Structure formats: C-alpha cells, structure tokens
Amino acid sequence: MKVILKKDISNIGRSGDIKNVRDGYARNFLMPRGLVELATEGALKAWKNSADKRAKRVSSEDGALKELSKRLEAITLSFSRPVSEDGVMFGSVAKSDIIKNLAAADIEIAKEMIRLPASIKAVGTFEVEIVLKQDIVAKVKVAVSAHSK
C-alpha cells in the first residue's frame, strides 16, 4: 500500500516521504495512530501544496529541539543508591528514574527517546543518549553515587 508519512517513523522514513508498506501494517497500526495517509492523487496534490507551510513548521520545531538539546547537554543527573560492603549496588538507575529527574527540571521526555540498553547497575558517571528527533541527539551525564545501607 502506498502511503504518505505524516510524521518521522524510525525504520520507515521521514515526514513527507511516500513509501510502500504492507497493507495490514498500514491499516492496523499506522493509520489508526495518524502516522500516515493513503497516497491518493488528491492527497498527493494537497501534500505538495502545503509543503512550504510544513517546512516552516519543521524548521521551527528543529530550532526548539536544538535548544532543548543544549539544555540537556548542560545537565548532570545525580542518583544515590545503596551499596553493600562488597561494593554491589542494590537497585539500578532506569529510564523511569531519568524521566523523573528531567521532569523535576521542567523537561518532558518520552521513555522511547532514551537510549539505554539496560539499567545502570554500577557506581560512576555515564552518558545517556536522548533522541529528540532522528538527527537531533543529546547526551546527558548520569552520575551514580554510593551510600552504605
């Protein structure tokens, strides 16, 4: 099925691209979420006519995201976790912990934006990537310190 992407979708394409996707995927997943539109002649004409307006909106969104990226890179998140006498950390620092700390700094981030393959289970300083958009990535410093139980 030929569709027009309304939003950037990872592994498929960017907003405005015309892609062929499987019928079931388009009908059952992409269309109900408002991510795509069926690529009919009328839709293609309307999409081309509104290209300038979309380009302005995208550039303003990109500017705001780059500004947010600069704010994020200046932040160091601190966490304190209990550690046993052997140096083994109890608990971990997960995506949800990072989201809560960023929310305290008035920064709203979706869980899917954080690239953290596994929870942090060690004491130290780590860099965590936050993907704001496909080409805008911020790196946040996460400092995990120990306190005795």
Image (cartoon, rainbow, N blue to C red):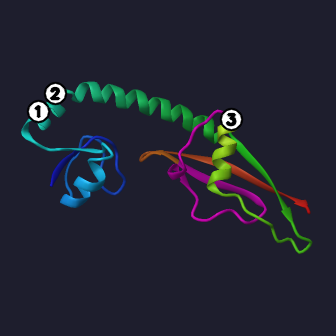
Which residue is label 1 attached to? 45
Q: Which mark is residue 33?
A: none
Residue 8, compared with residue 23, is above or below; it is: above
Alpha carbon separation for disc pair 3 and 1: 43 Å
Nearest the eye: 19 or 26 = 26
Q: Which residue is mark 2?
A: 49
Measured as percent of width and height from the top left, residue 95 is found at 62, 54
Q: Height in image: 65 above or below 113?
A: above
Q: In what quadrant of the picture does the N terminus appear?
A: bottom left
Give how far across and how far down residue 90 sits, in percent: 80, 66
| Camera-side residue of 70 and 2 | 2
Q: CA distance from mark 2 to mark 1?
A: 6 Å
The verdict on residue 123 being magenta is yes
Q: Which residue is denoted by mark 3 in the rendering?
A: 105
Q: Residues within 10 Å of mark 1 (few under 14, many from 20)?
A: few
What is the magenta range? 105-130
Residue at 29% x, 47% y: name it. Answer: 32
Kind of residue sitting beneath label 2? Asn
**Helix, strand or loop for disc 2:** helix
Tell whether label 1 touches label 2 (CB within 8 Å).
yes
Q: Give the amino acid type for the residue marked by disc 1 in the picture.
A: Lys
Location of residue 102 with respect to 93 vertically, above or below: above
| Label 1 residue SS | helix
